[in-house]
Amino acid sequence: SRTKAFLKDFVSALSQADRVIIQASFASARNDVSEGEDMGKVLETELSKHIMRTFRCRCQACSYAPDDQSAVAIAASWLQPNSLCITMGAGNNRALSARIAQARRSL
């Protein structure tokens, strides 16, 4: 419900990052999104449109990752020496940063 309510604000804020990976977003208990609608995918679509429409948009790439394994693989492939990677979310994603770092080191 938060993603739906603040979709434009999320797009605006995330467009300030160099690259963004968005994962699946699950409906709240309030059932205020259509059944089967993944607001993470909606957000990725809207951010991608914003990137293509906005001249000099800071964000260079946006990708949707349906699961943690995909997010780790994408992030590891994007990172370069001295890159900063921030993971955040409403769920339990604390372990992602360590998994991303390990995957990057193994490349």
Image (tube, helix red, strand yellow):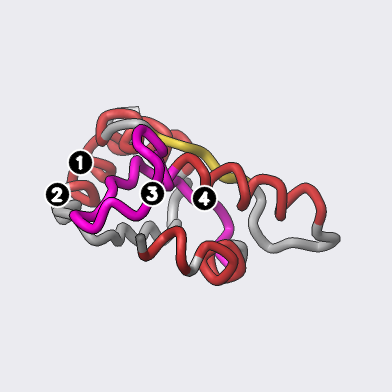
Question: Which secondary structure lies at badge 4?
Answer: helix
Query: Comparing marks 1 and 3, which lies closer to the viewer?
Result: 3
Identity of the residue drawn at 25% across and 36% down: 68
Identity of the residue drawn at 80% across and 59% down: 54
Question: Which secondary structure lies at badge 3?
Answer: loop
The quarter of the rendered structure image containing the N terminus is bottom left
Q: Which residues are magenta?
A: 16-40
Using the image, determine if residue 16 lies above or below residue 45: below
The type of residue carrying mark 2 is: Ala
Q: CA distance from mark 1 to mark 2?
A: 6 Å
Using the image, determine if residue 97 lies above or below residue 35: below
Dots 4 and 1: beta carbons under 8 Å?
no
Nearest the camera: 104 or 64?
A: 64
Q: Residue 99 — which label?
A: 1
- Lower sequence index among marks 3 and 2: 3
The residue that label 4 is drawn on is 43
Q: CA distance from mark 4 to mark 1?
A: 24 Å
Query: Comparing marks 3 and 2, which lies closer to the viewer?
Result: 3
Q: Please provide percent x and percent y for residue 56.
A: 81, 62
The type of residue carrying mark 3 is: Val
Q: Residue 95 — which label?
A: 2
Check if residue 37 falls in the magenta segment: yes
